[in-house]
Image (tube, helix red, strand yellow):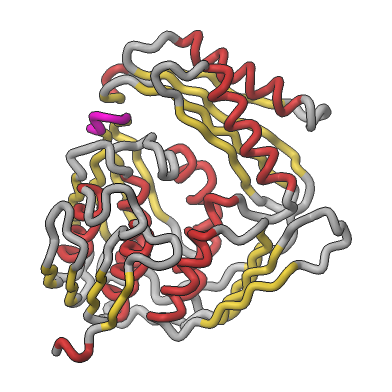
């Protein structure tokens, strides 16, 4: 059996947890036994962290697979997938590990399950080095649903660094196949909105300061739009621990959504948090792409699985995206091309990511 394992080098390119997420999800979908070596070799603490391990264990349970080497700090795993089944699955990082990253690894798999799924994901909802749950709901969800599926995401409790303790419940039904997407027209910005939040021991004034600083920063570039960033205090029964942050979304005339976000931490001025998010949003608007830098790499696995040609106009290709493309091509029959967009405006640094998807068919679905 071992001779047929696909060998993945977890230390190349982006060299982090993303390689593990993309390759194990595709292994599960395609029924390919996998060996991943040099896991997170590029990180200061190499090997599996609690968040990666809980993701792997969830994928194993989703498909009755076999996982060897699944312990904290392990730099090599082998994974042998079984058949993907629906139902209720629980993944708990027991830390502030990101629930959004758990969702990234599980979602492509449960789309091709035999029956509907309910995922209970526990950990950090608004964590560093990962999308915030607000981003997942406000940006990722409406765009990813263009692949012709829907899901429900219910934020039961928010959890912050270092404790975690958040919980999100994701419900989705399987599909027969995914449709390709075409996101090539940016349009003009029609709306800018968002939320600045505090939880736990922090006063609402911080949220108001983050919001006001963000609005001032955006106003310098965009003068003629109403900017609605709500300051909110998370209810105590819906948040564990203390945290703060902000997300700002720009919506365009063609339905594109691009965002900027930032998290507060001890000793970091509230104005700085607001300005960071605003500058990230303005940066994402400047390149002229239809998706922001955070969404780019999250689309790749879906483009690879879809039936037909997907096209996405983006800003400069991130290392995360290059990495996702590399492993999607290694494991599937999808073909990606990235070309510099021949823009009317030479100042724009835009690219077209095109993918001939493999046209994955859900053989588990009896219809």
What type of secondary structure mainly makes up the magenta span? loop
State whether residue 185 appears in this view.
yes
Q: Does 65 appear in magenta?
A: no
In percent of width and height, residue 62 lies at 20, 65
One can see residue 367 in this view: no
Q: Quadrant of the N terminus?
A: bottom left
Q: Which residue: 88% across, 61% down? A: 344
Find the magenta span and give its range: 160-165
Residue 261 vs residue 2: left or right?
Answer: right
Q: Position of residue 256 (x, y in %)?
A: 66, 51
Q: Position of residue 157 (x, y in %)?
A: 29, 31
Classify residue 213 as left or right of residue 162: right
Q: Tell whether position 162 is magenta.
A: yes
Image: 297 above or below 34: above
Residue 94 screen position, x and y as percent: 17, 39
Residue found at the far right of this picture: 344
Quadrant showing the C terminus: bottom left
Relative to 298, is 300 above or below? below
Answer left or right for 243 relative to 325: left
Q: How many marks?
A: 0
| Residue nearest the viewer, comparing 260 with 19 | 19
Residue name at image x 19 percent, y 75 percent: 81
Which residue is rendered at x = 59% and y = 41% of the image?
259
Instruction: Identify the residue at horizontal 26%, vertical 82% (top origin).
Output: 32
Between 79 and 266, the one nearer to me in the picture: 266
Residue 34 image-quadrant placement: bottom left
């Amino acid at each position: 059996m071992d001779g047929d394992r696909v060998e993945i080098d977890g230390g190349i390119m982006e060299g982090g947890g993303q390689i593990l997420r993309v390759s194990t999800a595709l292994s599960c979908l395609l029924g390919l036994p996998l060996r991943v070596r040099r896991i997170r070799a590029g990180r200061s603490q190499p090997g599996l962290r609690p968040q990666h391990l809980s993701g792997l264990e969830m994928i194993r349970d989703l498909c009755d697979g076999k996982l060897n080497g699944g312990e904290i700090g392990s730099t090599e795993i082998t994974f042998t997938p079984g058949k993907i089944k629906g139902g209720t699955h629980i993944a708990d990082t027991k830390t502030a590990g990101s629930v959004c990253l758990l969702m990234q690894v599980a979602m492509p798999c449960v789309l091709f399950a035999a029956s509907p799924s309910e995922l209970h994901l526990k950990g950090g909802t608004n964590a560093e080095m990962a999308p915030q749950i607000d981003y997942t709901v406000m940006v990722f969800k409406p765009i990813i649903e263009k692949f012709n599926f829907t899901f429900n995401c219910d934020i039961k409790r928010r959890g912050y660094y270092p404790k975690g303790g958040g919980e999100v419940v994701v419900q989705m039904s399987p599909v027969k196949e995914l449709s390709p997407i075409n996101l090539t027209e940016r349009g003009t910005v029609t709306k800018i909105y968002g939320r600045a939040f505090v939880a736990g021991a922090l006063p609402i004034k911080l949220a108001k300061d983050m919001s006001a600083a963000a609005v001032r920063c955006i106003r310098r570039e965009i003068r003629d739009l109403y900017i609605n960033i709500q300051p909110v205090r998370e209810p105590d029964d819906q948040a564990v621990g203390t945290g703060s942050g902000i997300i700002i979304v720009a919506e365009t005339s063609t339905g594109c959504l691009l965002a900027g976000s930032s998290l507060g931490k001890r000793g970091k001025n509230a104005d700085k948090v607001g300005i960071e998010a605003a500058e990230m949003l303005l940066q994402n608007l400047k390149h002229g792409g239809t998706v922001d830098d955070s969404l780019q790499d999250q689309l790749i696995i879906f483009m690879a699985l879809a039936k037909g040609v997907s096209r996405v106009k983006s800003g400069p290709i991130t290392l995360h995206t290059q990495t996702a493309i590399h492993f999607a091509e290694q494991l599937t029959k999808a073909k990606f091309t990235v070309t510099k967009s021949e823009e009317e405006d030479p100042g724009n640094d835009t690219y077209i990511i095109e993918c001939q998807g493999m046209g994955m068919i859900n053989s588990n679905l009896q219809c």
